[in-house]
Each structure stands twice: as C-alpha cells, then as structure tokens.
Image (cartoon, rainbow, N blue to C red):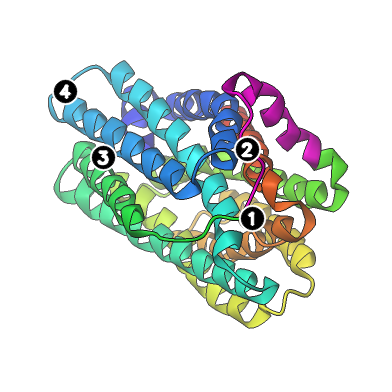
Amino acid sequence: LGVVAFRQGGATAVGVVAFVRMAPAALLAPFGTALADRFPRDRVLMWSCLIRGTATGLAAAILATDGSRVAVYALAVLATAAFTVFRPGHSALLPGLCTTPLELTSANVVRGLLDSLSTLIGPLVAALLLDIGSPAAVFAFTAALSAGSGLLLLGLSYEAPPRAPAQPLRRIVPETAEGFRALTRYHDAGLVIGLALVQTMTRGCFNVFVVVIALELLDMGAPGVGLLTAAVGAGAVAGSLGASMLVSGRRLATLEGVGVALWGLPLALSGAVPHEAVVLAFMCVIGVANALVDIGLYTLPARLVPERLLGRLFGAKESLTALSVALGSLIA
C-alpha cells in the first residue's frame, strides 16, 4: 500500500494514507473487541479474517484493472478495521487455552516467533511479487492468506470460561468504556500498555520512513521496501528465539522497556549512516526490539486484569495503538 501511495503522491501521500487507514480503526476497534467478551472469541476472529480477506481481494481486483486509488484506500481502511479486532480477540482467547501462567508465557513466545517469521517471509514474498508482478499481486496474496486464516479457525475447539449472561446490545458503549477504565484501574497493566504506545508511535514513523529510505535514501526500488521490512522480521525471529529462554516470566516489563528504546535508536541512526548494509543491520535490531516488547505486552495484562475484561482491555489497547500509529505516520 505504501508503494501504491508513494507512486501517486510521494512521501506525503504515504503518511496521509497511513493515517487515514489507521484512524477509523482506532474508533472501531473497542466496539469490535467488546464483541469478543460477548460471543465465542474464535468466531469473532474468524469473521475478522473473512472480512479482511474480502476487502483486500476487492482492492487487488481494482488495482489489477487500474481502477480508482480512492476505492483501494477505502478498502484498506475496512481491512485494517477488521484486523484491529483480531489481535485483541486472539490475546483474550489465548489464556482460555492455557492452564498455567508459564504455559501462557510460552504460548506468547511461540506466537511472537510466528509473528516474526511472518514479518520476515511476508515482505520477502511481497518484494518478489513486486519485482516480477505488481502491487495487485501482493494484495491478492494477502487476501488468500486472510481467508485461509478464517477457515483454519473453523477447526478450533475449546471450553469457554463461564461468564455472566450478555447484557442487551444497547449496553455495548458502556461495556466498551470499561476497557479504557481498566487502563487506569489496573495501574500496572496501564503502564505496560502505555510503554507499548510509545513503540507503536515509532512504528507509525517507520511506516513512512521505510518507504522513503528504500526509494530515496538508498535507491533500492520498490522491492527494497519489502527487503528492509523483511530485515525487521529476521531480527524479530532472532529476538523471539532469545525470548524463549525468558519464559520464567521474570522482568518481562523491563524487557519491554528495553525493546521500546531499541525501536527508536536504530531508526534515528539510519539517517546518519545511509549505507544499505548498515541500515539492514539497524532494521534487524528493530526486529529484536519488537520481540522484546511483545513478550511482555501480551503476557502481563492477562495476569493483571480479570479474564472477563481481557477482550475489552486489549481492544482499548488496539484502539490507542491504531491512533498512535496513525499519528506517528502523519507526523513523519
């Protein structure tokens, strides 16, 4: 999407499109994830995947026929809004599939490793498709993955924890607000999520910078965007493997803080040392940082907040994340 926007209007268009894509998600995520505390969480995840896959597939078709870029951006907004429901719902579901805190930490380490592998392999595939094809091919590939994710969830079987009967749907707004109130009521959880918001604003800056670094600073061409992003994934794989040695759960918040610092420093240094090999190494460090942030961020709140509130808490976090990414992109 960044490549499409850059070709239409340069770096400014990349930032504006990133902001427009994330801002509606910030508003919709809390309401969507409130559903994860009302309905079976696996079904909420399934519909998130299918809506995202459909929207991305339509965007691919429009790009392939050289249709309206505005329609592509609008469908990207819809796909992003659907995706912002997925991570909070997934984070709220995972404790229900685990039996001990250690198992939950281990599961989050494995999830982080899979995320990291995705961040490595996905951009490399995107770079290849951009090299031999077009952005439409990348969109089509992404749509297929999203639809496949939704179908895989059909096979999930688990025993949902008991909870009170769902309130009438008109109560969805005050229920959603409880997720935001939990950030102040449970101070430690609020601190963990507040740290993560610093990282996500930096990630918003990264969304713009990575396109500019590849196309203007290093002259790597459109595939360079995928290559630099894949370097982040390579570092994240290494970080996730290292994090697997930390599953005892000690000092997870400290590791998260270190990860936040390591997100910003390499990005700043990339402008000072504009050499391709050096910048690729910096991107790897950002990947390591991402793994350190995630292990604390997605493990600690489940220990600090009641299970019945987890979906809404992670929804509030996802909303604030989308807003901070949007602002970071716009500022950059």
Residue indicated by mark 3: 139
Q: Nearer the viewer, mark 2 or mark 3?
A: 2
Label placed on residue 66: 4
Assess whether mark 2 and mark 4 are in contact (beta carbons under 8 angstroms): no
Label placed on residue 165: 2
As rendered, which of 279 and 332 lies closer to the eye?
332
Mark before the other along the chain sequence, 3 or 4: 4
> Which quadrant holds residue 168?
top right
Q: Mark 1: which secondary structure?
A: helix
- Picture quarter with the C terminus: top right
Q: What separation in Å lies between label 1 and label 4 (alpha carbons)? A: 37 Å
Residue extending farthest to the front is: 165
Q: Residue at x 27, y 45 (%)?
A: 147
Label placed on residue 121: none
Mark before the other along the chain sequence, 1 or 4: 4
Residue extending farthest to the bottom is: 245
Q: Position of residue 269 (x, y in %)?
A: 62, 54
Amino acid bearing label 3: Phe
In the rendered structure, which segment of residues is drawn in magenta? 162-182
Residue indicated by mark 1: 263
Q: Is residue 292 left or right of 284 when viewed as pictured?
A: right
Task: Confirm whether residue 205 shows in the render.
Answer: no
Mark before the other along the chain sequence, 2 or 3: 3
Task: Confirm whether residue 161 shows in the render.
Answer: yes
Amino acid bearing label 2: Pro
Mark before the other along the chain sequence, 1 or 3: 3
Q: Give neighbour class at mark 1: few <14, some 14-19, many 20+ (Cα, 10 Å).
A: many
